[in-house]
Image: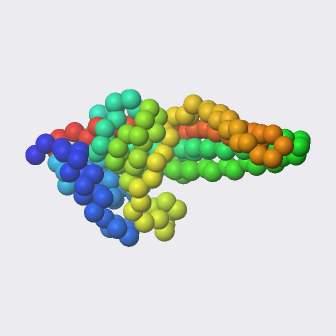
Amino acid sequence: MAYNGPNAVAFAQRQSGRYGDGECWTLVEDTIVGAGGKSSRVLTPNFGPLSSYVWGTVVTQAALQPGDALQFTRYSWTQTVTTAVNNPDGSGTDDSRTETQTRGAPNHSALVVRVLNSGLVEVIEQNIPTRTGQVQTIALALTALPDSTTTTTTPVAGGNRVTVTTVTHSVTGTVACYRPINA
């Protein structure tokens, strides 16, 4: 049976709560094998609970498609949003909010649901947070996305309020991308 990525994604999306034993590997392994792919048990050298699992043929992030597998090692994506508001009277506010997503201490497995844009994918996973995380779908940046700045001018009494919003990203660790192969 040939591996079918869309079938793998559909299977994973039908899961709710904690799948199997709740480990990230279990969801990805059962999904890939059930859709006709080869087991990571066979493909991973020295397979064990702390292994960096191999799910098939290595592909570039640019070539990712639904049903591909990701193996994270000490991955962290930090996104910081800074907003500066300047009022016509010279008053204003500065606000900064930082959100960090981490995966893989040391390793974590997920399945690509869809590619959102270059460097940003939607994945399905479980075991985040560790030992309690249920099956979830989330967007993750695989490489640092371009920084962006948006300026908005709003007329108010006495002039214009200028709001400048800057978004920065950083990504550390590694993400191995795999195209599952036929069993």
- Residue 22 in the image: state x and y as whole percent: 39, 66
Q: Residue at x 40, y 32 (%)?
A: 61
Q: Compared with residue 29, is residue 61 higher up or lower down, i.e. above or below?
A: above
Give whichever of 1, 4 is nearer the camera. Answer: 4
The image quarter in which residue 3 lies: top left
Which residue, as the protein is rendered here, is positioned at the far right?
A: 90
Q: Nearer the viewer, residue 36 or 84?
A: 84
- Foreground residue among 5 and 154: 154
Image point (26%, 41%), residue name = 180
The answer to whether any part of residue 51 appears in the image is no
The part of the image, by quadrant, that contains residue 65 is top left
Q: Is 103 placed above or below 115 here?
A: below
Q: Is residue 106 above or below residue 136?
A: above
Tell me the residue at 30%/59% (across/down): 13
- Left/right placement of residue 24 relative to residue 173 reads left
Task: Tell me the quarter of the image containing the C terminus.
Answer: top left
